[in-house]
Image: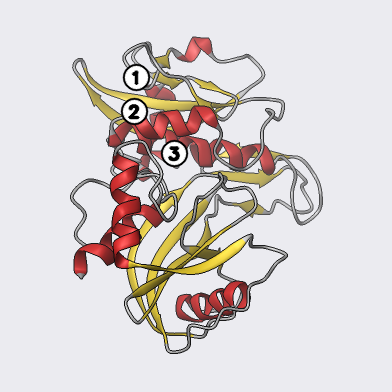
Amino acid sequence: MDVAAPIAFSGSHIDRADHIRNDPAALEALRTAQARLLRMDGLDPVLTDDSALAWGDLADAAPDSELVFLGIAQGADGEHGCFAEVPATTPPGGPHAGPASWKAMAVLESGELAAYGAARALVGWHIRHRFCAVCGSATAMAKGGWQRTCTSEACKSEHFPRVDPVTIMTVEHDGKLLLGRQPRFAPGQYSALAGFVEPGETIEEAVKRETFEEAGVRARDVEYVISQPWPFPSSLMIGCHAFADDPAIVMDETEMDDVRWFTREEVTDALAAVARGEQGKAFGAPPKAAVAHALLRWWVERG
């Protein structure tokens, strides 16, 4: 897919510097007065008055928190290490994006949004993995925050940050697009169907299964379009497109509020309305930051 602008949460300006993670001396050398600490309110971003990410000094971190090494960034005064704070207690809030995150998606420059997204996903992973999944003992941070190791001498299991693959798909039949809405969506808002890839599945199989489970529609000819990191809490959205021969819908009422087919004209109108901060005549399209928006635009533009 040819995207005019970077997809949200991609294109970070921070070099992840993997070679430094295993080098305690090099990591310690980066903890200088020039090191930067990403300011966060729990898992939410903190923005400056001019709508940029707020950065502070390592001294701003709480004494009982852990520091995750995000990588190295190039500044006006040279290279400096970038870190994020893992609070000692679990911050409030659910896994979905809240008002502060949606605001950041609307105003942050793409590279900064990507830096925040990586930090949020990594910090959230540490908060959820304070204890070993094998034996239940406490875990300790390792490799600059890109590993946690069980502290039990009898176990010593190593745990690494993971992403959860999610298929998100547009399905086409006779010039119309299949979209649905979940109960948590804003009134009138529709989006592409989506679901987690299950163990033992290919991406194509997950697209077909989720489409049938949520809408009762049999999908075929699945093609990959685009992907997007989505740090709520740690997903990788895998955007796909497929076709259907039978438009009959049998909706899963336990997951969906509504599923229906929309014409190209209706989708085009809904996308144009997003740019005006409005809702389309037939439905409200996903916001620009969502990969579903890019999928809908790709479908409209390819004609």
Query: Which SS class for mark 1?
Result: loop
How was this image coloured?
secondary structure
Check contact, mark 1 vs mark 2: CB within 8 A: yes
Look at mark 2 in the image and give the residue it sits on.
Answer: 107
Judging depth in this view, the residue of 232 and 64 nearest the camera is 232
Check contact, mark 3 vs mark 1: CB within 8 A: no
Q: Residues within 10 Å of mark 1 (few under 14, many from 20)?
A: some
**How far apart are the alpha carbons under marks 3 and 1?**
16 Å
Q: Height in image: 217 above or below 183?
A: below
Q: Quadrant of the N terminus?
A: bottom left
Three-letter amino acid code of the residue under disc 1: Ser
Give the numbered dot on residue 117.
Answer: 3
Query: Which SS class for mark 3?
Result: helix
The tag earlier along the polypeptide, 1 or 2, is: 1
Q: Mark 2 or mark 3, which is nearer to you?
A: 2
Look at mark 1 in the image and give the residue it sits on.
Answer: 51
